[in-house]
Image (tube, grey):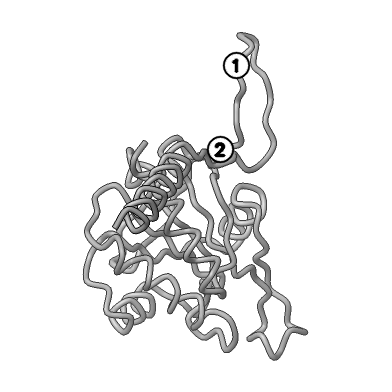
Amino acid sequence: MRKLLGFSIIGFMALVIFSCGDSDRKLPYIGEREVDAKGDTVYHSIPDFKFINQDGDTITQEFFKNKIYITDFFFTSCPTICPVMKTQMLRVYEKFKDNPGLAILSHTIDPRHDSVSVLKSYKKRLGIDSEQWQFVTGEQEKIYEIAQKSYMVSAMEDKEAIDDGGFVHSGAFVLVDKNRNIRGVYDGTKEKEVNKLIKDIELLLKK
């Protein structure tokens, strides 16, 4: 009995140490940073934006005010990584479904094909029935610009990439905090990476 008690105490202490360590863990800030005139560090942040969602409504940064969000880039006719990405993002959605502190923002990189009605049908096929996950379209140049310069992921048209549907884009999921700072980038095609994303989301939601 004494021996079992010893193992129980050791196990409990290990759990406490692990829990404390995880709660104290801090996520990095991704991107360039600078020091302002006051000596404060200014981190890379996502600028204002304006896109059109699957319902024809304008979506701006105001929709994500006081929320953390995950963003990605895809197109509905993608024959390669997009279906895998959406399967993994559905895991995130189901985990945090209806949590007011989290949103998901998916940009199409093929706005010529992915009209409002196409995005609406796509969202319905995925079984998404809430405003928590937004699918947006807009000017192709604006979408590519915010992908490459702000979220720091690849998104471009490449007619030679026939096997990839004529586009090249990153499979990344980008985690953005309430201050529009990037706090993590994850491979959205890998379950292990998305598991890490889920843990990091939980950490940010506690802040």
Q: Residue at x 57, y 89 (%)?
A: 79
- Foreground label between 2 and 1: 1
Calculate the distance from the C-alpha at mark 2 to the C-alpha at mark 1.
15 Å
Q: Is residue 106 left or right of residue 98?
A: right
What is the number of the mark on residue 45? 2
- Label 2: state its secondary structure: loop
Q: Residue at x 73, y 84 (%)?
A: 161
Residue 15, how many percent across, how many down? 39, 49
Q: Earlier in the sequence, mark 2 or mark 1?
A: 1
Residue 193 sits above or below residue 81 on the image? above
What is the number of the mark on residue 40? 1
Q: Nearer the viewer, residue 123 or 38?
A: 38
Residue 84, how many percent across, how many down? 51, 81
Determine the image quadrant of residue 134. bottom left
Residue 129 sits above or below residue 83 on the image? above
Q: Residue at x 68, y 74 (%)?
A: 168
Q: Residue at x 42, y 59 (%)?
A: 198
Q: Is residue 157 left or right of residue 19?
A: right
Say how many tags the image has.
2
User: Which amino acid type is shown beneath numbered disc 1?
Assistant: Asp
Q: Residue furthest right?
A: 160
Q: Quadrant of the C terminus?
A: top left
For mark 1, does the 10 Å Cα neighbourhood hold few (<14), some (14 to 19), or many (20 or more) residues?
few
For mark 2, does the 10 Å Cα neighbourhood hold few (<14), some (14 to 19), or many (20 or more) residues?
some
Residue 125, how many percent across, how many down? 31, 84
What is the number of the mark on residue 107? none
User: Which amino acid type is shown beneath numbered disc 2?
Assistant: Ser
